[in-house]
Amino acid sequence: MVILSLDTSSRAMSVALLQDDRVLGEWCTNTQHHHSVRLMPAVRQLMAEVGVTPRALSAVAVAKGPGSYTGVRIGVTTAKTMAWALDIPLVGVSTLQVLAANVPDFPGLVVPLFDARRQRVYAGVYRCTRGEVTAVRPDRVLPVADLVAELAATGEAVAVVGDDAARFYDAFAVGLGERLWLAPPELGIPRAACLARLARQRLLAGAVDAVHEFAPAYLQASEAERKAAAGELRVAGSGRERGTGAAAGGDGDG
Amino acid sequence: MTTTKPIRVLGIETSCDETAAAVVENGRTVLSSVVASQAEVHRRFGGVVPEVASRRHVEHITRVLEAALEDAGVRPNDLTAIAVTHGPGLVGALLVGVAAAKALAFSWGLPLVPVHHIAGHIYACRLVGEMHFPLVALVVSGGHTELLYLRDEGHVVVVGQTRDDAAGEAYDKVARVLGLPYPGGPELDRLAAEGRDVYAFPRAFLEPDSLDFSFSGLKTAVLNAVHGARQRGEPINLADVAASFQAAVVDVLVEKAFRAVKRYDARQLVVAGGVAANRGLRAALAERAAREGVEVLIPPLSLCTDNAAMIAAAGTVLYRLGRVADLDLNAVPDLDLTAE
Ligand SMILES: [Zn+2]
């Protein structure tokens, strides 16, 4: 069984090939540059170097978010299209779970996170025990202060994982004191090899995703949908502008 | 034993709010054309919301691809190339189509052909008739008002464009002021047929030698007329406003198009884009063409609005010219037509 795994949901871009329980190869960069341009060439190069053809793939695994909306869409679209084109199973895994899997074993809670701006984070609460990565709480987007308060109330040791974690160090340190462990930078990047391992576990358990229905886990509605739901519906710019103008601005995630 | 294998191109279009895929044979025969429209989704926002459009594209893309192959009755092995719109358009929306196209090209080992959205609109004409070069193309839609000169196949030059609003954009804004439901263009066209041109709104012909357009002055004149009448409490005949506005737009489009035909000694005038579905425009173009003895080619409505058959048709032309891309192809929201 050969699994191709890809993650473009954050600053990092990672691609890996897992044959049964052996990592054939992994490619990982952490520069937020042109995931759209670099993803397929990276896949092609990695597959060529380890001698795997598209037809030899058994499944495609993808980090389904949360993360950059655009980034997640590039990975998810690529993965579901490849799975459909090659008629092989698709397995989506939470990007936060992939990040948590960087900590194989920890006596306490593992908290992977990404910055969601405005003092909020995309965060998960996991338990990592001898390679098993189990969600204690569902992935959420929430104010960092709320997350810290919730973790402080557990009384447990907390490992915070993620490239953006250092940015919130003070908030965590004040709330958790000696019980905080900020994982080192090399563990703060989601790794496609970890993603492939989690996907393989799900695959062996028969838990594959339906290709057509598969969509990113954004964890929040778009700004326009939130405003509409809140009754703040205002008329945007003109209807069908291309490339420039009102319709092209405002609601992205940068 | 020389059997020529047909060229079958799978086209993908996601530049705005339609997720579309199509299979075209030899650049002329539409084997399938599937369009998943999001118009209903965006109606409540009064316009296309880019983030919402991008999300819907991801949800629809493989289903649309599957339907395109099934409707065409072809398997991946029967395909020659994958063509995709890589610009211009909403960047997040374009990226979904580009990512899908690259995934297919790699998975099936097929060449990848990037297509400019407007080139797609123009080559849609090959699906309904012969294109006779040199020709002039008038492309009018929500996002574009452009005059193009094609010396021969694959050589497109922009010779006129809007200096402010696109014609379709002016249609949408006027329709909104008249209280017509979104999308307003077709509604306005329908209403105009019931009215008369009594307002004599300004026609911006610009400099005598110019092939450019300007619709913001017209738009302002219409808005002022409607707002002024409402403030004074005077009754407004909305059908007359619609007819007067449409007459002004059509006059300018027709005049500029035939100026271009004359200047470039074109054998044919091709009209494409969503606004080409407008009955007032079609009628005026046909009348002027008959008078001047110029051949006009306008695709049927289903090929005027955004679709992927036009991308596959254009992709076939470009594939034959060897204009293929590598897997590092990117979406270019403000893509230049001359970059093709
Ligand atoms: Zn168009």
Image (cartoon, coloured by chain):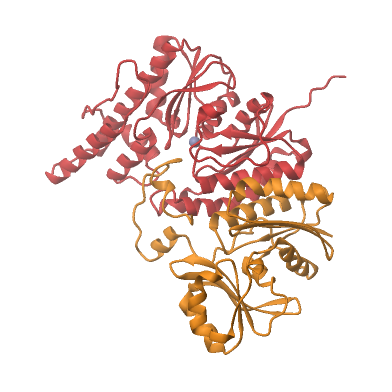
Residue nearer the viewer, A68 or B245: A68
Instruction: Identify which residue is drawn at 35% across, 37% down.
Output: B171
Q: Is residue A219 left or right of residue A89?
A: left
Q: Is residue B84 visible?
A: yes
Image height of B253 relative to A164, above or below: above
Colour in which the image shows chain B: red
Residue nearer the viewer, A121 or B209: A121
Q: Quadrant of the C terminus of chain B?
A: top right
Could you tell me residue B65's position as x and y percent? 66, 45
Q: In this view, does B145 lie to the left or right of A111?
A: left
Furthest-left residue in view? B232
Could you tell me residue B302's position as x and y percent? 53, 34
Could you tell me residue B10's position as x and y percent? 67, 37
Which chain does orange denote in the image?
A: A
Q: Quadrant of the N terminus of chain B?
A: top right
Could you tell me residue B41's position as x and y percent? 47, 53
Image height of B270 relative to A204, above or below: above
